[in-house]
Amino acid sequence: MGLNDNTVHWDRVEKGVERADGRLIWRPYGFPEIIDPSRSYFHEGEIQPKWDVSDKIVVQSAITGAFYTRNANPNQPITTEEILKDAQECARAGASAIHLHMRGDNGYNTLDRDRFKAVVNPLREEFPGISVDGCYVTALQGEWDEMKIAIKENILDGVPVNTAVLYNGDALFAKPAPLMIEKTRLILEAGAAPIVAVYTDADVNNAERFLFRSGLLGPGQVWCVLPSIPGASPMENPHQMFTGLLRMVELVRDVDPEAKIFVCAAGRASVFLATAAALLGLHIRVGMEDTVWKYPHKDEKLTSNLEAFLQIKQIVEALGRQVATPTEYREIMGVKPLEQATS
């Protein structure tokens, strides 16, 4: 529409401008301070107090998952040596904690305890007190018994319990209720930390029904929120990302008002989702377990877990916050010191 194609009464506008003498309506009652952003002239109270956001934020590095291959990302760490190298690089750069899967000779998930120890032991030797948790996925025959031995040996400080029923990509991933209940019991009995891992709204409800209403878990648990991957709560655009994340966090808070929540930089949402978590005062998990992409709007792949960690570390620091140290991680998440967990 051009200047001449409108319904404005320009003669009336001209008279209005003349009447106003070109001046807005302005009465500075607090003179000589025209606008004070923190105080009012009329009372002593502070009108814009500081937000209640902790200076410290946990940023955990999740080194590799169970199934992504180098077809998805040619940089994916697969071998035990590659997984250890990436974990060490992230820990040296200041990661709060490390999350692990291990891969077998076929490149897929394994519960081989020797492989876990080949990564965990050197990490703990170089970084005393660092917390290492990881998934014991019992998908194959005999793995349940392997998991029970691994939990009893206290190889890891924490173990996730997936309260999930979903299609993860093209694979059906469902944790039967008896398994999630018994796995939680085994973790608690060993003195490790159960991590409630949820991918969708329904997973939160599953956790409430089977783990919390049963009395097995009480308030103040560690939760891992993992949307955005195929089959999980969808985040196909920024609006879905924000509304979906807020809904999941609210659902978790309804179940566990004292919850300590990780948000995973997962799927296409990747670093945008991690940034949203930082803005909300939540904690973050980044790394090549949960996504292959560096950005949601580009096909650029992550080159390493160190790149993923440094990317979000820079964002966290730009927001005036600090990445929690391994010692602070244990305090924030309520994870026992290593000597207590193994005694």
Image (cartoon, rainbow, N blue to C red):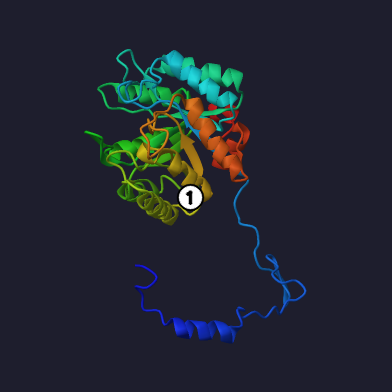
Q: Nearer the viewer, residue 166 or 304?
A: 304
Name the spot of residue 317 as percent of width and height, x first: 60, 40
> Residue visible at 44% across and 43% down?
272
Q: Would you place residue 87 above or below residue 164 in this image?
A: above
Q: Nearer the viewer, residue 239 or 86?
A: 239
- The residue under label 1 is which amino acid type? Pro
Name the spot of residue 66 as percent of width and height, x first: 34, 26
> Residue visible at 47% across and 42% down?
274
> Residue visible at 36% across and 37% down?
267
Q: Is 342 positioned to the left or the right of 140 in the image? A: right
Name the spot of residue 125 as percent of width and height, x first: 59, 18
Query: Residue 225 occupies which quadrant of the picture?
Result: top left
Assess disc 1: are there few (<14), some (14-19) or many (≥20) residues with their C-alpha within 10 Å of its C-alpha: few
On-image quarter of the C terminus: top right
Query: Residue 341 occupies which quadrant of the picture?
Result: top right
Q: Nearer the viewer, residue 172 or 154?
A: 172
Can residue 335 be seen here? The reply is no
Name the residue that disc number 1 marks.
219
Residue positioned most to the right: 32
